[in-house]
Image: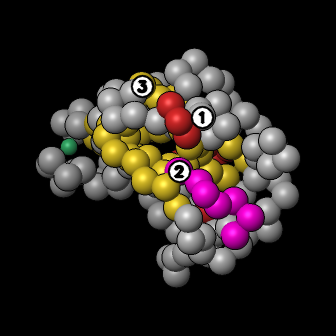
Amino acid sequence: MFEWFGKINFCPHTKVDGFAAHLRDGRLMGSTCTACGNLNFPPRADCPACLHGEFTFTELSGRGTLLTFTSIDAAPAGFENDVPFYLGVIDLEETGRLLACFGETIDPQEIAIDMPVQVVPRLLEESESIKIHYTLEKPGTTWVKTGPDRGE
Ligand SMILES: [Zn+2]
């Protein structure tokens, strides 16, 4: 799983590693506990409600509402050419919260608390260290297989 998100973890395996494979296929997944039916995002290997250790993946709509946002003007290494960029935290329609960058379908001038957004998985085929991520887009935006056109 982590080879697709970059080198960020020492654990080579996790029970929720199917999450990245589903993202590669354009699907945002939560986990549903097989004992109590509790739905979680991000997916949880063990249910936080009843501690049961078995779950199934459940596809989420990706629809959400913007809870808060910020602009990044001093970028971390490797993102110097992308500033300024905008990050938002959204409440997903089904459950959970998600942090992501805004994509090119939303003009920074349009960003407003409580606006509806769509989470769109993306592949970064030009990146060596990070292969997949997702962006916040206008509702109805469909999956984009390659990275955003940085020339726009
Ligand atoms: Zn449970």
Residue 9 disc label? none
Please give the residue where the numbered disc 2 appears in the rendered image.
86
Q: Amino acid at mark 3?
A: Pro
- In the image, what residue occupies the spot 23% across and 37% down? 38
How far apart in space, not on screen, are marks 1 and 2 (Cα)? 10 Å
The residue closer to the viewer here, 124 or 70, is 70
Query: Which image quadrant is residue 115 in?
Result: top left
Percent coordinates x, y for residue 68 in the rendering: 34, 45
View quadrant of ligand 1: top left
User: Quadrant of the image for the C terminus?
Assistant: top right
Q: Which numbered disc flags the more N-terminal residue, 2 or 3?
A: 2
Looking at the rendered structure, the secondary structure element under dot 1 is loop
Q: Amino acid at mark 2?
A: Tyr
Q: Residue at x 52, y 61 (%)?
A: 72
Q: Of helix, strand and loop, which one carries label 2? A: strand
Percent across and percent down for residue 140 are 57, 18
Q: Is residue 136 above or below residue 21?
A: above
> Magenta segment: does it hold 103?
no
Location of residue 135 (image quadrant): top right
Q: Is tag 1's residue or tag 3's residue first in the polypeptide sequence?
A: 1
Q: Nearer the viewer, residue 141 or 28?
A: 141
Query: What span is colored magenta in the figure?
Result: 80-86
Q: In the picture shown, does residue 103 fall above or below 42?
A: above
Q: Check contact, mark 2 vs mark 3: CB within 8 A.
A: no
Q: Which residue matches tag 1? A: 107
Q: In the depicted view, which residue is nearer to us: 10 or 143?
A: 143
Q: Is residue 85 magenta?
A: yes
Residue 107 is situated, as x and y percent measured from the top left of the image, at 59, 34
Query: Along the horizontal axis of the image, is 3 left or right of 33?
Result: right
Q: Residue furthest bottom?
A: 10
